[in-house]
Image: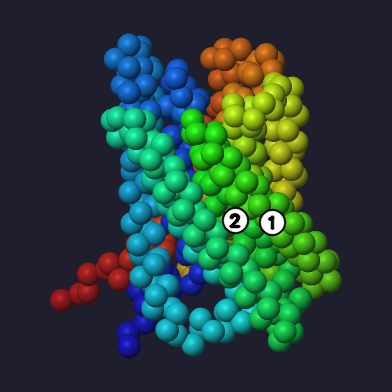
Amino acid sequence: MPSPLRPADRWSPPYFLSALGAGGIAVTFFLWLYMWVPHPGQPVPIFEDVARAFAAGQPLQQAMIVLAYLGLGVFAVQHLRLMVWNLRRFAAFRRSPSFAEVQGSSAGAGLFGLPLMLAMTVNVSFSASLAFVPGLWGVIEYLFPLALAVFALLAAITLRMMGQHIARLSVAGRFDMTRAGSFLQVQPAFALGMIGVGMSAPAALSASPAVAGLSLVLSTFILVIALVWSAVAVVVGILAMLRHGVVAEQIPTLMNIVPLMAVLGILSLRQTHGMHVHFGLHNTAGDDLWFLTALLAVQIAFLGLGLSVVKQHGYVARFVTSATPSPGAYGLVCPGIGFAVLMQFWINKALVGAGLLAKFGAAYWALSAVVLAVQLAMILLVLALNRRHFGLPREALAVPAA
């Protein structure tokens, strides 16, 4: 058989993160609408809110809405395209000898990119539907039980995979500490977190106490398991790094905690809102300020760790811009997206909510500029990675001499 022309033709589990990154960028554009468009009557903006804001808005606000819709639409489609591509390639990968080899080793944690990607698909579809579908809020209560069923199924699949992963490694003793110097083992917790944040949406949005309560209970189970798993995985990864050094190709996983904090933070905010509306728990602005600041501090600590190791090992030159780029480089996108998302909530829910920052003032836009800069950097990174992994190499494009 001819040798593959593109890196993506040699599929491996880290390519799940290509779809995840596109989906994350789509969500960051939805947050423009969530944070900057008034939506009285419901906790999230819907098509009618945006249409009303566009009709009455100034040119700058109208431009923001147009860009938000373009970004959300383009990257949601990109996510769906890459999701389908990954599912097809994974189906072929399952029939190869490499699948059993990966599944039976510590690298099997990378397979949790599958439920992680699928949970992102549901979350992106929900955000896009709110923005693009008129009249959706009128039938939203009928959709919440369906959404809970889908996320419960994904949670069951993920928990089963986690049990099998532990069983294979513990029974056969196949966990190789010499290849565990990373936070790859955090990925199952990240998958659970992505499922949990979607599972918690009805707790914040549903008018039914029964639906909100079920959402609260199920997402709490997911939250606790994700926290316990991630704590153990971080300890194992640190011990392996101190003893055997970091696994160079898995360096981006050192920042897996960053997006995990974002999804678990939003999950918790949705839960507290639901408990306030339905069950009499009254959260204060000071609670949100402390909680989101603590999560942001954790993110900054792990970003600092990861970026320093990226620089020390020359990761970009070795695995991003080299002639043979690594699919693991898509793991650099998720921390940036996670940081930008949590920063949006910190600015708007913590600082503005506590009265420390005037919304749409100079200081507000100065901080928001940081979010927009990170968002733009992740867009450029995704475009560059897609070009290197999915575009034809220069030698394949050259026209042979007559």
Residue 134 sits above or below residue 105 on the image: above
Mark 1–mark 2 Cα distance, whole angstroms, equals 8 Å
Residue 143 sits above or below residue 207 on the image: below
Report crowding for label 1: few under 14, some 14 to 19, many 20 or more residues within 10 A (C-alpha). Answer: some
Q: Amino acid at mark 2?
A: Leu
Name the residue rendered at 44%, 42% in the picture: 144
Report crowding for label 2: few under 14, some 14 to 19, many 20 or more residues within 10 A (C-alpha). Answer: many
Name the residue rendered at 73%, 33% in the picture: 291
Q: Helix or strand or loop: what does disc 1 sit on?
A: helix
Residue 81 sits above or below residue 70 on the image: below
Residue 134: x and y in percent read: 28, 30
Rendered image: mark on residue 300? none
Q: Nearer the viewer, residue 281 or 308?
A: 281
Q: Amino acid at mark 1?
A: Ile
Left or right: 340 as drawn, with respect to 225 = left
Name the residue rendered at 50%, 53% in the picture: 151
Q: How many marks?
A: 2
Residue 306: x and y in percent read: 69, 53
Let me know if residue 400 appears in the view: yes
Q: Where is residue 251, by image quadrant?
A: bottom right
- The residue beneath circle 1 is 225
Whether pointer 1 and pointer 2 mark residues with C-beta atoms closer than 8 Å, the reply is yes
Name the residue rendered at 62%, 62% in the picture: 188
Q: Where is residue 298, by image quadrant?
A: top right
Rendered image: mark on residue 192? 2
The colour scheme used here is: rainbow
Q: Helix or strand or loop: what does disc 2 sit on?
A: helix
Q: Where is residue 285, by image quadrant?
A: top right
Q: Nearer the viewer, residue 167 or 263?
A: 167
Q: Nearer the viewer, residue 5 or 365?
A: 365
